[in-house]
Amino acid sequence: MKYIFTLTLLFISGRTFSQIDIELRDISKHIGDSVKVVGKIYGGKYLEQVKGSPTFLNVGGDYPDVPLTLVIWSDVRKQFYQQMPEVVLKGKECWIYGKVELYKGRPQMVIHNPSQIHEPVKVDVN
């Protein structure tokens, strides 16, 4: 039993730390990779009337010149605890974790958990 637990723990740990740190400008070179990238959220749109009620967040530029689009489906949006991600994250520089996919020729990342997007911790050196 200890052996199975250890193997499971190693597998989970490996998946957690298998992200590649990349620059946002290089996002299109990492389709299919799990990455960690920093980018400013320029805004977004919540399409409540569309099937799945997606939220789209523009990372690194305004639409349509967006290096990366984040897709948050309605079931995950609910996990943001009544906060509207397209409003609360607008203008913020964030760490973003996830797998880069290609949709209609553009890089996107589907967010499965709010913890995939967070602001870097600011350390006061004074």
Image: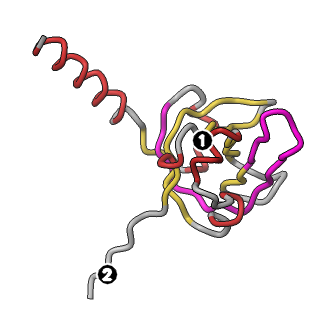
Q: Position of residue 71 (x, y in %)?
A: 69, 41
Please tell me how crowded label 2 is: few (under 14), some (14-19), or many (20+) other residues with Cα within 10 Å. Answer: few
Tell me the residue at 49%/57% (across/down): 118
Q: In screen coordinates, is 98 left or right of 65?
A: left
Q: Which residue is mark 2?
A: 124
Q: Which residues are magenta?
A: 34-56
Residue shown at 57% from the left, 47% from the top: 79
Q: Nearer the viewer, residue 22 or 81?
A: 81
Residue 24 sits above or below residue 88 on the image: above
- Residue extending furthest bottom? 126
Q: CA distance from mark 2 to mark 1?
A: 30 Å
Q: Which residue is label 1 attached to?
A: 27
Residue 65 position (above or below residue 100): below
Q: Can you tell which quarter of the image residue 89 is in?
A: bottom right
Q: Secondary structure at mark 2?
A: loop
- Percent of width and height locating residue 87: 70, 65
96 on left or right of 45: left
Q: Residue furthest right?
A: 49
Q: Nearer the viewer, residue 17 or 30?
A: 17
Mark nearer the N terminus (2 vs 1)? 1
